[in-house]
Each structure stands twice: as structure tokens, then as C-alpha cells.
Amino acid sequence: MDTVSNMIERSYFDKMPSGEEIYAYTLKNSSGASVKIITLGGRINEINVPDKNGVLADVICGFDNAKDYLSDSAYQGALIGRFGNRIADAKFTLDGVEYKLYKNNGNNHLHGGEKGFDKKIWDVKSWQIGSEMFLELSIVSEDGEEGYPGKLTVAVLYSFNDENTLSINYKATTDKKTVINLTNHAYFNLGGYDSGNIMNHTLWLDADKFTETNSELIPTGKEINVEGTPFDFRKEKLVGAEIDADDVNIKNGQGYDHNFVLNFDGTVKHFATLKDTASGRIMKAYTNQPCVQIYAGNCINPDDPCFKKGVKQVKRCGICLETQHSPDAPNQPNFISCELDKGQLYDYTTVFKFEF
């Protein structure tokens, strides 16, 4: 193992089918808590944080090798781009020009298409300032890639410190007007990724509304008040309390896979608290994004390849808090715009703080 500094370690992870090598970077703080990021997809491969007794556990689902990450359809731990979530009919119109995208979710476009940012090898720089460790991952998406206009230059900065706080800052610029919606698709299980499902986790969410969707999870354009619905997390409650509720927006008992409209003001503010009572672990989340997709792992297939150390996958093994703009925003004029102009800086931050 090649030590980049006393708290950032670089190690070989695996290689791509092409032979290109994949590396892992572990950011380890003075208490022993750590975050591991791999260059394949800029994925969060591990987050090891203490429970109420000081015992460390890895709270991120994921794999030990590249083959399973590349064949996985759940986007485990990955950076998502160019556009997180769905775009209806895999097309949009920008300044009178129609752009056609790759259809990889039925008739729709999902998470960047056939070869999104989750399947690319990212360039890396690392450094440390005091007790805080930084890992910058960068990539260039050429004009026309996956059907999107503009050459997009992206830099994602991960940082981790002695307060067990993981920050993710997304920056991007383009040489031609385009649309963009970057996020991370980590699956959190605060009991440990090997502890079963997340039905006993509690969630508080600062969202008065959620986005109504059709049977393909494409927004109808309506934002519905959470009051009196299974989507009201304004008071902390069990994730599993109503996950199979017979509700028009929880299709066929599948559970939560919905975009919540946050009560945001453009600043990085506290929007969610996730808790696991058994371990005592708490994760507080902050963002300046306007929305978050809450996905409870409803479609995880136990027959898919095992997670790290041979742990079998289980349905609802983790919960995703994908901070974002609304799905299908390029086709929904009443949603907050996801357009990025030449010379404009895309700049959003999401923070996950682990406590017990």
C-alpha cells in the first residue's frame, strides 16, 4: 500500500476489462473512522464510523471488485451524471433544439445513460490541511456524449475530518448550454451493511411536498403536500412504518422511490436525520440542493452478486438520500431549472455528519 500522507492511503482495488487500473483512496481520521473512495465511478466503497459503544462498522453497501460494480444496476455508491434520475422519453428541448438521449430505463433515460459517470475512471488529486483530508475527482464529458450538448468539465471534492463529517462538493462548467444534475447514489445502513434491512431506521425530513409520478416514476408536474400521506417525515418516524402502504404513489407495495421538495433557501442547511436505534448511529444530512430522492432499496435482488466479504444482498439493504434537482426537470418548466450556461459555475454541496 502506497501512503499518500499519514491519513490518506492509496491502494490497488481492481482493473477494468480493458486493463485500466482502479485505485482506492482511504481517508482515515485520528479516531480510526474512515471513508474509502474508488476511482471507478468515484464510488463511496466504505464508510467506517463508531456506534454508541465506540465500535466501528462499515455503513455503506458495495462490492469488493470491479466486475460486480460494472454489472450492478443499483448504482451502488456511485457519482451520477450527467443527469441524476429520469428524463421522460429520453429527450428534451433546449433553446429550440431537441436532444435525444440513450434509453436505459424502459422508454426513459436514467442516471446518465448507457455509460454514465458511474462507469468511468475518474482522475484524482489528494491533499490534507490540518486534520481535514481532501480527495478531488475530475472528469471531462465531451460534447454529444450520451446525447447531451456541451463539453462538460466536472470536479467532485470529497472531504473527511475528525468530526466524522463527509462533505461532497460538486462543480462543473460547460462550453455550451446544457442540462446537469449531479448526485451520489450511496446506500446507507447505519447498523452496518451486513446487518440486514433498514426497516427499523427512523427518518426526519424537512420537506413539505413530494413530486407526484406516473407508473414509470416520471413526474406528472404536480408537487403534492405530504400532510396526511405516507410521505410525511416532518416528524421523525420509522422508514418501515408505511413503506408498503396502499397509496397511489407507493406503487404495488414497492416502497419509497420518490423526489421530496426540500424547504431550502439556497444555503447548505440541515434537511434530514437518519437513525438506527440498535447501534445508536445517527447521520445528519445537509445540502443546498432543492430536492432529495429517497430510495429505500426496494428493487435490490438477493440473487445478485454478494456485497463485500461475501455478504448476501437483501431487499431494502440500504437507503439512498440523493440530493438533486427534480427528475425530468428539462421537460418540466415549472420545476427549478437544471440548465447550465457557458461561463456559469454549477456548484452544490451535500454533507453527511455521523454521530452516536
Image (cartoon, rainbow, N blue to C red):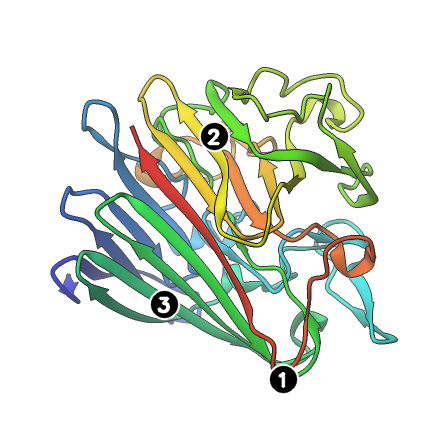
| Mark in the foreground, 1 or 2 | 1
Looking at the rendered structure, the kind of residue marked 2 is Cys
Identify the residue under disc 2: 317
Give the mark, 2 or 3, whose residue is nearer the N terminus: 3
**Left or right of residue 131, residue 229 in this image:** right
Compute the Cα span from label 2 to label 3: 29 Å
Picture coordinates of residue 330, whole percent (x, y): 77, 61
Quadrant in which the N terminus appears: bottom left
Identify the residue under disc 1: 175
Q: Which mark is residue 94?
A: none
Query: Number of labelled discs?
Result: 3
**Left or right of residue 244, residue 330 in this image:** right
Query: Can you name the residue that lies furthest to the right here?
Result: 96
User: Disc 3 on helix, strand or loop?
Assistant: strand
Picture coordinates of residue 89, whole percent (x, y): 83, 56
Compute the Cα span from label 1 to label 3: 21 Å
Q: Can you say whether 208 is above or below 22 in the image?
A: above
Identify the residue under disc 3: 136
Picture coordinates of residue 313, whole percent (x, y): 46, 32
Q: Residue at x 64, y 30 (%)?
A: 256
Query: Can you name the residue that lies furthest to the left here?
Result: 6
Q: Quadrant of residue 352?
A: top left
Looking at the rendered structure, the kind of residue marked 1 is Asp
